[in-house]
Image: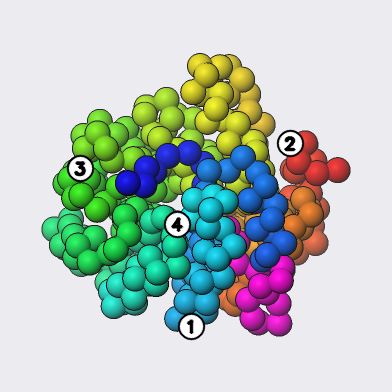
Amino acid sequence: MFELEGIYTPIATPFADGKIAYDKLEKNLDFWLSSKLTGIVVMGSNGEFVGLRESEKDDLTRFCCTRIKGRKKVIIGTGSNCIDETHHLNKLAAECGADAVLVVTPFYYKNGMKDNILEQYFTEVADRSPLPVVLYNMPGNTGVNMSAALLAKLSKHPNIIGVKDTSGNIVQISETIHTADPSFSVFAGNWAFLLPSLLMGAKGATLALGNVAPNECAELLELVRQGRLDEARTLAFRLMPVNAAITAKYGIGGLKVAMELVGLYGGEPRSPLRKPGKEVCEEIAQTLRSAGLCR
């Protein structure tokens, strides 16, 4: 049985001339696969999954699984407002050799997404999924929050193995760790609250920061495991400005700028997202230099 633990990064999807740039992605994958990351998440939020056509999702799943399988763990983001699409992607991910699937809450009818509705939805998804299901709580983007009480219920499902919680609510995260089934893995969804989450018992994280600083992200978990908390705190603080620049402040556009600064291909995000202007790009560069991530 697949165990959800360690540090993953939700990889950015590269585009060129409006299409997925698979040649650029292959080179980026070489960088991530040679790092200390535990695994890769394909079609997470940083992969711009909401801007991909169904055929692109299928092709991207096949491409990444073929190149990652056997080298690191791979989780495919399959969440959608269309449950049939999620069922389809779960089946395809299994056929391609993925280890698990990441399923975000449905979010268009957000006012109707009460705990009982979400419990029924994720139970149906997990019942039919040939792969273990990781729940994805991303209220900042979806407007839907999965409560600790709901997660405790879903943690008892034999095919639901964990949650990526990007709420930033350390009280809720701590309550989930305390009340969920012991086999259920709680992952922090952002570097900003990774350290306190680990100290409360989280088993790992899925981090946008891992796109540009994969080894540093893995190092933090190792420092905590070794009880070297002062060093862990110093590392956490050092990279917080970088994390802020590529998440809350400048989003995916900022992340792709940062990727280019560390020698990866970033490219343009897909519309309506945009890269930031020249002044912000220089700010991001200075932030990375201050953190020792680029010259």
Name which of mark 1 and mark 4 comes first in the sequence.
Answer: 1
What amino acid type should be assigned to the residue bearing mark 4? Ile
Per the model, the C-alpha gap separating discs 3 and 4 is 22 Å
Residue 133 visible in the picture? yes
**Kind of residue at badge 2:** Ala
Q: CA distance from mark 4 to mark 2?
A: 29 Å
* Image quadrant occupied by the C terminus: top right
Q: Position of residue 293 (x, y in %)?
A: 76, 41
- For the residues labelled 1 and 4, the Cα–Cα distance comes to 18 Å
Determine the residue positioned at 34% across, 53% down. 134
In the rendered image, which residue does mark 2 sit on?
291
Q: Which residue is at a point 37% across and 27% down the rendered structure image?
A: 200
Vertical order, 81 against 131 (above or below): below
Question: In terms of depth relative to the viewer, which is nearer, 196 or 110?
Answer: 196
Tell me whether the residue at label 3 lies in contact with that at label 4, contact meaning CB atoms closer than 8 angstroms: no
Q: Residue placed at 57% from the left, 51% from the top? A: 71
Residue position marked by numbered label 4 in the rendering: 75
**Residue kind at label 3, given as amino acid type:** Ala
Residue type at tag 1: Ser
- Identify the mark at residue 152; answer none if there is no mark: 3
Residue at image coords 22%, 38%: 180
Mark sitting earlier along the chain (1/2): 1
Disc assigned to residue 55: 1
* Circle 3 crowding by C-alpha within 10 Å: few under 14, some 14–19, many from 20: some
Q: Give the residues in magenta.
A: 11-24
Quadrant hosting residue 223: top right
Q: Label 3, label 2: how many angstroms apart (C-alpha)?
A: 38 Å
Residue 196 vertical position relative to residue 60 in the rendered view, above or below = above
